[in-house]
Amino acid sequence: MAGPGIPFITEQDDKKVTEFSTKLSRDFVFALSTDYTVQSIVTPSNIEINLYTFSDTERKHELLDLASRSLEYFSNRIGAYPYSKLVITETSLDSKGGIEYSGVIFIDSDYLLTSEDFFSITHAIGHQWFYNIIGNNQIKNAWMDEGLCDFIKEGFILSDVELDNKMNEEYAFLQTIISEITPNTLNSSLSDFACWSDYYNVHYLRGKMMFYSLCKIMGKESFEEFLFEYNQRFSFRIATPKDLTQTAEDVSGLELSTFFETWINDSELPQL
């Protein structure tokens, strides 16, 4: 059995009972399989990562190493991971990649066996901060966790020059299709979208572009201070768009209302 926190196993009426003890969790999920095998790694900051799999793959060490480096990366940029463990569990999902929960990530079997890289896991680990530690309305303001996770993930994968090149390429792509997407603004709710690709191009891609542009305006050092302060102010609370924008203004000393207004509400893309 794979689940969050610390498991306690007891015998009750000839049955094995597993209870999980965890704190400060927004949700709870577990997985069961008689075929699970477990491999573990301990990060430099002493977080135990357990990988539960039932498929025969030689890439378990690769995934664990990436998970360890990703967890350290987000911890260093934003604030400490609040739990003693992270569990990554192979399951069968409707789409390739991973799905995040408090202290637990489900990873799709096909993705585990066929993916060229595991950077979807880096993104899912980022959600331990953005949705879990810092909550937000994921239906109405998905850019607050999806867009920010994706932008910070790019910094894990790419050098500064590579990041600039990729953002410019993706911005050029988004410019060519933005007028064909309805709705195409960040103030759009999940239920407003007719398909996944439109939702992705708005809340993931446009959201990522906005945070990249914000970093350029604030400066890298100030943006890093913003991430830390945002985490300090809203850990285990629910942040609103106003909370995020106010934190950015407070840290940078800049007036950013027009910047956020155009990126969030204008149908046309602002300049990058």
Image (cartoon, grey):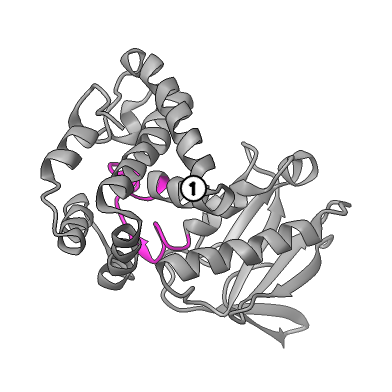
Tell me: residue 2, above or below residue 127.
Answer: below
Magenta span of residues: 128-146
Which element is circle 1 on? Answer: helix
Q: Nearer the viewer, residue 173 or 191?
A: 173
44 sits to left or right of 268: right
Residue 100 x/y as whole percent: 53, 55
- Say which of 254 and 97 sits in front: 254
Task: Please name the residue shown 15% across and 47% down the image.
Answer: 256
For the image, the number of numbered tags is 1
Q: Amino acid at mark 1?
A: Asp
Residue 70 located left or right of residue 128: right
Q: Is residue 21 above or below residue 218?
A: below
Which residue position holds label 1? 160
Q: Is residue 157 visible?
A: yes
Vertical comparison of 97 with 62: above or below: above
Magenta-colored stretch includes residue 45: no
Mainly helix, strand or loop, the magenta region?
loop
Question: Which quarter of the rendering shows the C terminus?
Answer: top left
Q: Quadrant of residue 185?
A: top left
Q: Which class describes the residues within 10 Å of circle 1: few (<14), some (14-19), or many (20+)? A: few
Residue drawn 21% across the image and 50% down it = 241
Quadrant where the image shows the N terminus:
bottom right
Q: Residue at x 79, y 68 (%)?
A: 38
Task: Look at 62% across and 36% down and name the residue there.
Answer: 95
Residue 233, quarter of the rendered image: bottom left
- Residue 131 in the image: x percent, y percent? 39, 57
Position of residue 86 measured from the top left corner of the image (x, y, whole percent): 60, 69
Given the current orientation, which residue lies at the most extreme front position? 161
Examine the image and state in which quarter residue 194 appears. top left
